[in-house]
Image (cartoon, rainbow, N blue to C red):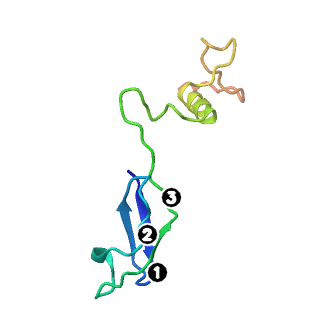
């Protein structure tokens, strides 16, 4: 059952309540959550809220099932080093520059 947010127009109290989707919205501020003493019986309005996150649980659902293709491709590039064709078994070449001088004989 979803949680709905309400705002009392009389006392300014904001509260949440769990109701079924088919239930009629509340019309007056509940006595236990009313900020006015004595109870003001203010009219309430249902507020628009972001709602809760949806989480599938069970053995058939994985967090990575619904990843975007861009994310999958980037993860694949990060996990395997790039290989060039023909250089698969050769060690990396040293940069060419000045030849190393042999150590002086003593």
Indicate which label's residue lies in the foreground, 2 or 3. 2
Q: Is residue 47 above or below residue 65?
A: below
Instruction: Work out how far the residue at label 1 is from the one at label 3, CA to CA, in angstroms.
Output: 21 Å
**Residue depicted at x 45% and y 49%:** 53
* Coordinates of residue 106 in the picture (x, y in percent): 53, 26
Residue sitting nearer the eye, 87 or 24: 24
Q: Which residue is mark 2?
A: 6
SS label for mark 1: loop
- Res 101 label: none
Residue sitting nearer the eye, 97 or 46: 46
Residue 62 found in image quarter: top left
- Res 50 label: 3
Q: Which residue is mark 1?
A: 9
Residue 73 found in image quarter: top right
Q: Is residue 85 above or below residue 20?
A: above
* Coordinates of residue 33 in the picture (x, y in percent): 31, 75
Residues at badges 2 and 1 in contact (C-beta under 8 Å)? Answer: no
Drawn side of residue 15 relative to residue 105, left or right: left
Label 1 or label 3, whichever comes before in sequence order = 1
**Residue depicted at x 41% and y 81%:** 42
Q: Residues within 10 Å of mark 3 (few under 14, many from 20)?
A: few
SS label for mark 3: loop
Q: Residues within 10 Å of mark 1 (few under 14, many from 20)?
A: some
* Coordinates of residue 60 in the picture (x, y in percent): 40, 26
Q: Is residue 103 above or below residue 71?
A: above
Label 2 or label 3, whichever comes before in sequence order = 2
Drawn side of residue 80 relative to residue 41, left or right: right
Q: Residues within 10 Å of mark 2 (few under 14, many from 20)?
A: many
Instruction: Work out how far the residue at label 2 is from the one at label 3, CA to CA, in angstroms.
Output: 13 Å
Drawn side of residue 101 relative to residue 36, left or right: right
SS label for mark 2: strand
Residues at badges 1 and 3 in contact (C-beta under 8 Å)? Answer: no
């Amino acid at each position: 059952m979803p949680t709905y947010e309400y705002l009392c127009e009389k006392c300014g109290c904001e509260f949440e309540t769990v109701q079924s989707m088919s239930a009629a919205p509340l019309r007056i501020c509940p006595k236990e959550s009313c900020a006015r003493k004595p109870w003001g019986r203010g009219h309430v309005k249902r507020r628009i809220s972001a709602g809760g996150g949806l989480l599938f649980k069970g053995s058939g659902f994985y967090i990575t099932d619904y990843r975007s293709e861009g994310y999958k491709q980037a993860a694949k590039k990060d996990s395997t080093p790039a290989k060039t064709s023909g250089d698969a078994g050769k060690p990396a070449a040293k940069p060419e520059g000045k030849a190393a001088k042999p150590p002086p004989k003593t």
